């Protein structure tokens, strides 16, 4: 597949096709040329770059893989109007976007609107090179501003020439957790006091664990293990050339296709040896999420959303309760309008939403990278999907910071909630472990 890709990048006809698409376009207008590469099951991970921005999205059980390398155009934002800023910028891109087929932008954002480090608070980008495997067909989409066609032709091959290392380093172990666990348990008890006092009904508290190693953690290897271990989840990543934020999430925030929307109300967790999903605590958690998601979507809908029956959803060794919520929205509703209305759901922040956010800010809740924010894909027609960035790690050189959270409601047991976070952390701990590494023959090659 790599040979077909290089032929596409260097063929004289590629520049001619781009020039034809760009005819009459403003110099800053995006131009995207989509070309077939043949059939295959390529996951593209061996082309993950070492020091270039990239995005990765995979749904392994649907044999769908996307790797985006470089940024042709991008915009960042922060603060209370961050989603509106991204929405306006994307609308500007789409107004003059010249393309011969499907073309995409990628986006991600942090949980809190004032979290600025180490990743941009909110980022939307049209990639320079997008590699796709969908329904066993492989494609490349080449994008550039119309005024940079000639430069882009020379730059694209260079973006493929610096693949990241794939060796998993020896871990040195974790930083001491005893005091951190005691502090987290104390916060659970504080949350329970305010829940009992009627201030809030639910608070989601996150924990962080830090793993250190004798060398850099390779994002391509970690993602390969997530693809194998979490086939029913969305495996995702964003890298900026230094840090890599990646994970495998079971939770869709919102999908928009032809004015039809689907959202997940996902809450409640079970794992081997835990309370059953049918336990009252899990049912209560999930009901709060259903209520809040429906209330957030209702202003965009002519009819009340349809709520599917709660069912068990597997995510590796974990199981959750999930209801699919569907509706039709007006033609002027954008995907980022819906993201702004939904985020944060009670599944990641608490309920009521504003009271829970105030509680978390008061208690100085800190979440690294884009953990419990969102990761999304948007096409040039305005359709797309955002997922909640869960089961994640922020890789930064020799250090990996892992996050997991648990929903605290009336009757929660602090030690049981601690056990739940440990069970969730296991997703990334397993992916970072050399003991579970994929043999070289298991990885699909481009």
Image (spheres, grey):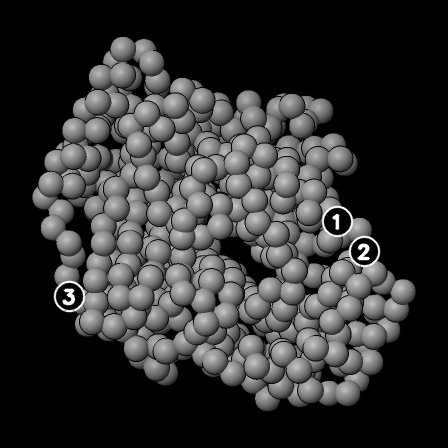
Distance in Å between CA atoms under marks 1 and 3: 48 Å
Read off the residue under disc 2. 96
Tell me the SS state at disc 2.
loop
Taking 8 as reference, is 413 above or below it? Answer: above
Q: Is residue 416 left or right of residue 151?
A: left
Read off the residue under disc 1. 92
- Look at the image and tell me in which quarter the N terminus lies: bottom right
Q: Badge 3: few (under 14), some or many (20 or more) residues near its Cα, within 10 Å?
A: few
* Mark seen at residue 172: 3
At x 75% / y 52%, what residue is drawn?
94
- Camera sees residue 444: no
- Closest to the observer: 219 or 324? 219
Residue 204, located in which quarter of the rendered image? Answer: top left
Residue 229, located in which quarter of the rendered image? Answer: bottom left
Residue 9: x and y in percent read: 67, 82
Distance in Å between CA atoms under marks 3 and 2: 51 Å
């Amino acid at each position: 597949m790599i040979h077909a890709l290089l032929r596409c990048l260097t063929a004289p006809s590629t520049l001619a096709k781009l020039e034809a698409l760009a005819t009459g376009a403003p110099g800053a207008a995006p131009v995207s040329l989509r070309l077939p590469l043949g059939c295959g099951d390529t996951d593209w991970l061996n082309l993950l770059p070492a020091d270039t921005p990239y995005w990765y999205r995979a749904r392994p059980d649907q044999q769908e893989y996307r790797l985006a390398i470089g940024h042709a155009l991008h915009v960042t934002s922060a603060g209370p109007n961050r989603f509106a800023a991204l929405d306006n910028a994307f609308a500007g891109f789409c107004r003059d976007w010249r393309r011969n087929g499907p073309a995409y932008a990628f986006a991600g954002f942090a949980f809190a609107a004032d979290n600025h480090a180490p990743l941009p608070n909110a980022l939307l980008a049209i990639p320079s090179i997008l590699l796709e495997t969908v329904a066993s067909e492989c494609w490349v989409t080449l994008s550039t501003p119309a005024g940079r066609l000639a430069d882009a032709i020379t730059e694209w091959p260079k973006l493929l020439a610096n693949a990241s290392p794939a060796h998993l380093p020896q871990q040195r172990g974790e930083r001491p957790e005893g005091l951190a666990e005691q502090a987290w348990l104390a916060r659970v008890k504080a949350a329970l006091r305010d829940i009992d006092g009627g201030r809030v009904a639910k608070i989601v508290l996150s924990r962080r664990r830090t793993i250190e190693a004798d060398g850099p953690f390779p994002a391509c290897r970690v993602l390969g293990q997530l693809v194998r271990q979490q086939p029913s989840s969305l495996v995702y990543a964003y890298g900026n050339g230094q840090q890599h934020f990646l994970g495998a999430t079971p939770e869709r925030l919102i999908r928009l296709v032809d004015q039809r929307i689907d959202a997940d109300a996902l809450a409640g967790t079970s794992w081997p040896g835990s309370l059953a999903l049918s336990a009252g605590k899990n049912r209560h958690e999930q009901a709060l999420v259903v209520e809040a998601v429906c209330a957030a979507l209702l202003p965009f809908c002519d009819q009340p959303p349809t709520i599917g029956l709660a069912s068990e959803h597997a995510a590796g060794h974990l199981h959750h309760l999930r209801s699919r919520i569907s509706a039709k929205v007006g033609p002027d509703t954008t995907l980022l309008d819906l993201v702004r209305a939904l985020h944060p759901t009670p599944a990641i922040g608490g309920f009521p939403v504003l009271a829970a956010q105030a509680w978390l800010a008061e208690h100085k809740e800190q979440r690294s990278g884009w953990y419990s924010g969102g990761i999304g894909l948007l096409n040039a027609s305005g359709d797309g999907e955002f997922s909640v960035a869960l089961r994640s790690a922020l890789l930064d050189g020799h250090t990996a910071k892992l996050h997991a959270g648990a929903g605290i409601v009336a009757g929660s047991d602090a030690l049981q909630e601690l056990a739940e976070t440990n069970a969730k952390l296991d997703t990334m701990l397993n992916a970072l472990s050399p003991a579970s590494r994929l043999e070289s023959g298991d990885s699909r090659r481009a």
